[in-house]
Amino acid sequence: MTPPPTHGPDHLTLALPKGRILDEAVSLLARAGLPLTVPEKSRALRHEFPGVTVLELRNQDVPTYVDLGVADAGIVGKDVLIESGRAVYEPVDLHFAGCRLSLIREVGASGEIARVGTKYPRAARAYLNAQGIPAEIVKLSGNIELACLTGLADAVVDLVQTGSTLRANNLEEVDVLFHSTARLIVNRAALKVRRERLRPLIEALRVLTQAVDSSE
């Protein structure tokens, strides 16, 4: 196993998700003053820059790495953060990777909801409890829409971006649980230990996203 490189006390370790968020996250962090470039396409999972290490992770693992202090900060969707239940500091809404978590059924379905399929059991349970719906929740991964189409579930809770997949499968959004965008998250202990690195980063990201805030 390759040993981790030795870093100074003010070195930052960032947890960023693979996939569509990574390029935009790196670009935004570079504009905020960090010496980052988009990692070359490779199988490398740890990328070293002057004063900064980037860990390339599965989306769902980012809150865990930040909460347990392996990473000082990270970027992750609000949907993943809510589902994780992790107690991290969330100082900035970065206003990209927008989507919504919705309750979805076949078009025209009106029967009882007895079973719900989802990748988000925590969020789905909170929603169903608030609505007084005592449905069974079945945790699934990938192609959640099939649960409705095959009769596995009476409804599903899943992310919606454009809605094109729903329309192609005769499905519709019945309700929106919440809207989600990418968020900066910070380990609470790191915020004190590496205050001189993290506070300027947080302020720079707030300035960069201020124009988006004021236009909403």
Image: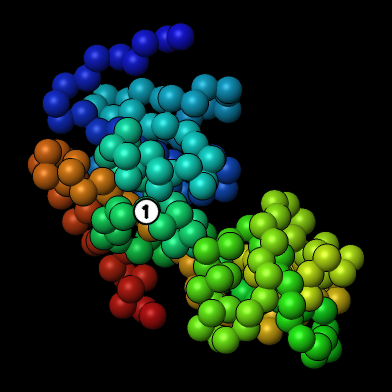
Dividing the picture into quarters, in which one does residue 173 lie?
bottom right
Left-right relation of 66 to 60:
left
Residue 53 placement (x, y as % from top left): 33, 28
Q: 49 or 61: nearer the eye?
A: 61
Residue 29 placement (x, y as % from top left): 33, 45
Mark 1: which amino acid? Arg
**Residue at left 87%, top 69%?**
151
For the C terminus, which image quadrant?
bottom left
Q: Name the residue under label 1.
A: 86
Crowd around label 1: few <14 · some 14–19 · many ≥20 (10 Å) = some
**Residue at left 63%, top 79%?**
134
Specify whether residue 70 is in view: yes
Residue 180 placement (x, y as % from top left): 49, 67
Q: 190 or 119: nearer the eye?
A: 119
Residue 199 placement (x, y as % from top left): 15, 50
Classify 20 as above or below 171.
Answer: above
**Residue at left 68%, top 84%?**
174
Left-right relation of 32 to 153:
left
**Residue at left 69%, top 61%?**
138
Classify 129 as above or below 120.
Answer: below
Tally the marks.
1
Looking at the rendered structure, the secondary structure element under dot 1 is loop
